[in-house]
Image (cartoon, rainbow, N blue to C red):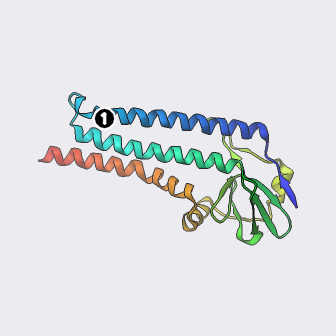
Amino acid sequence: MVWLEPDEKLLKRMVFNNNLGSFVTILVILVFLVLLFFRDHINGTPSHYVLTFTVGQVILFSTMFLSFSYEKKYLKYRIGVDDQFLYVKDPTGNVAVFSVNKVFRTEDTLVLDKLAIPLRVKPSKHSPRLPLYTQEQMLLLSKLKKVKPIDAFSYRLKSGEPTAFLELILILGYPIFGIILLYMFISEKLL
């Protein structure tokens, strides 16, 4: 069995980025909570618009915070490979064993039962996705079944993987809250 070791410099950078993202989302949540508290004192805007908008933003930014937390946790997992099994060591040292036939991978992620372990990361907005592992280590994972990202997302949702639900809330959340605000605005103008 071979344990894959990620690029420590890139890993530290991603953990820092996740910590920074978590901190910024907490600040934004606090700003929206202050706005929620003082909603009756905002001149010219009906308080129910402010209430709906701020509650929606608090929910979505809280979801982002949880997503950052899970991603940071998944970055700390270690992967081991042999001919028939894939071993995953969590940060506490517990090792889970998976059959190679039941593990999927996309270009960027290793999809296990209730885990989505990143293989490539994007350290900044304008940089390309960089591999966490060397080319030789990635070749060890080439025998795993490769699937499309939408199929991997569907599998993650079915298996109950937490970040899949968080991503779904983020994808659907903004349009839903936009429609709610638009409905409120239109119904008030028509009445």
- In the picture, which quadrant includes the N terminus? bottom right
Q: Position of residue 114 (x, y in %)?
A: 62, 63
Q: Position of residue 168 (x, y in %)?
A: 49, 56
Relative placement, left or right, of 47 versus 82 is left
Q: Is residue 62 above or below residue 142?
A: above
Relative placement, left or right, of 110 versus 186 is right
Please give the residue where the numbered disc 1 appears in the rendered image: 37
Q: What count of labels does the image hold?
A: 1
Q: Residue at x 66, y 51 (%)?
A: 74
Three-letter code for the amino acid on which mark 1 is drawn: Phe
Q: Residue at x 83, y 61 (%)?
A: 81
Which is nearer the eye, 34 or 160? 34
Q: Is residue 123 visible?
A: no
Which is nearer the eye, 166 or 136? 166
Q: Residue at x 32, y 36 (%)?
A: 36
Answer with the quarter of the image where residue 33 lies.
Answer: top left
Which is nearer the eye, 186 or 163? 163
Relative placement, left or right, of 89 versus 171 is right
Mark 1 residue element: helix
Q: Residue at x 55, y 57 (%)?
A: 162
Q: Is residue 3 above or below residue 35?
A: below
Q: Position of residue 185 (x, y in %)?
A: 22, 44
Q: Position of residue 131 (x, y in %)?
A: 75, 46
Crowding near pointer 1: few (<14 within 10 Å), some, many (20+)?
few
Q: Is residue 134 visible?
A: yes
